[in-house]
Image (spheres, rainbow, N blue to C red):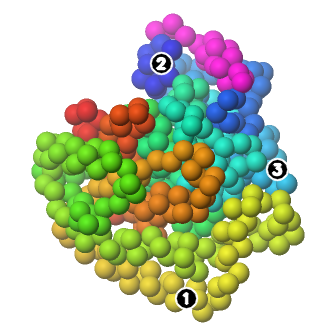
Amino acid sequence: MHLDIASLRAAYLNRALTPVQLMRTLATRIHAEDDHHIWIHRLSLEEMLAYAEKLEAQDPASLPLYGIPFAIKDNIDLAGCPTTAACPAYAYTPAQHATVVAKLIAAGAIPVGKTNMDQFATGLVGTRSPYGACKNSIDPEYISGGSSSGSAVAVALGLVSFSLGTDTAGSGRIPAAFNNLVGVKPTCGLLSTQGMIPACRSLDCMSIFALNTDDAEAVLQVAQGQDTLDPYSRATPASACSTFPPAFHFGVPMPQQCAFFGNSETPRLFTQAIASLEALGGTKVEIDFSVFLETARLLYEGAIVAERYAAIRPFIEQQPHSLHPVTRRIIEGARQFSAADAYDTLYRLQANRASAADTWQQVDVLVTPTAGTIFTIAEVEEDPVNTNSQLGYYTNFMNLLDLSAIAVPAGFQHNGLPFGITLCAPAFHDHALLQLAKRWEHLS
């Protein structure tokens, strides 16, 4: 059974399938042995059927996501289901859906469960969870990527059509690359974060994992929109860019600024990706990537990490031993910074934003590897901080610089593990990036 939205929609429209039939089939898969450590909470068959049965009285053509199953990262609220952020002691049961979840359900989508994650969305690896290290969908010896680990693997293994993740430092892109998916990291504020446990409230966004760009676009169309309940929500301006020109300029880091961390295959795959973009009508422009790298370092090496502390301050001060050891070490590191340090960091960030803005006078879009390499679970457990830092090389700067991005598959290594690239542009270029990603997908 193909779970892409177009296939399911066709089956519903010609009456070859009903939502109830789909849920009965999927429930067997979802409730099978969770060898990959995907789930924190799975809805029962009866709970899934309650959503499905409501749809069967409606015309499949009347709802854009009619009968489409989806999973939810467990720092996003689904009414009546516990939200844990992968910390059992923190758990609570919300009475209301997060705004985006409510929109998706109103559009016909059916939630099936809450997914595993790096605790409090602090990590890019998918291993920092008391519910087990989430395993890669292609080779379980390798990491899934994080923090939206289970959300990506659930889509990749055919358990749902799409899923919700979050993204502060790369959590909506790294798992997409490692599981051969499309990952949309929208402009901050484009999707409401109401009903989402914050990591860094001023930098967080909700993200989307999908099987292809058409599915990602369909979900984004439903999920987006300003929300008065979210003070960081933003309306899309009339000047938002909806498409890039057929002949476009794309920036890539200078060769000496690219990092692949000892991987001998990913440089070749990135070179091939550049050639494919040129075949689409793109002109490559090598840019000085240093300001992006400097900005990336601010996320954990500067006082910005204190925002993670602020997000869970009462909890970490009252129950520090309830946190995963690596998560606790990172977040408690914020105690060394003063308010003056925070302002110094913000001044540096503002200067970097001004410097980075010059890039967009040269190029329409910036293209990087999503990650230079991938690690085994054992390698991450042996060196959890350095491996995580290497994964953030191409991702940590994006929300700090207010960029929009989409991660797309870009081939495979000889061991079968996928490689991906990320296309990014200034805020509110989300739909332009999707259109370019569609062109890329059709070329591939």
Q: Residue furthest bottom?
A: 340
- Kind of residue at badge 2: His
Closer to the N terminus: mark 3 or mark 1?
A: 3
The region drawn magenta spans: 14-33
Kindly tell me whether residue 424 is visible in this rendering.
no
Closer to the N terminus: mark 3 or mark 2?
A: 2
Task: From the image, state whether disc 3 or disc 1 is nearer to you.
Answer: 3
- Kind of residue at badge 3: Pro
Give the CA distance from mark 3 to mark 1. Answer: 34 Å
Q: Main secondary structure of the magenta part?
A: helix
Q: Which residue is mark 2?
A: 2
Q: Residue at x 13, y 54 (%)?
A: 283
Residue at disc 1, secondary structure: helix
Residue 352 included in the magenta stretch of the image: no
Q: How many marks?
A: 3
Give the CA distance from mark 1 to mark 2. Answer: 51 Å
Left or right: where does residue 270 sit relative to residue 3? left
Q: Which residue is mark 3?
A: 88
Residue at disc 2, secondary structure: loop
Label 1 crowding class (10 Å Cα cut-off): few <14, some 14-19, many 20+?
Answer: few
Q: Which mark is residue 343?
A: 1
> In the displayed structure, would residue 18 be above or below residue 396?
above
Residue 137 in the image: state x and y as whole percent: 53, 32
Closer to the N terminus: mark 1 or mark 2?
A: 2
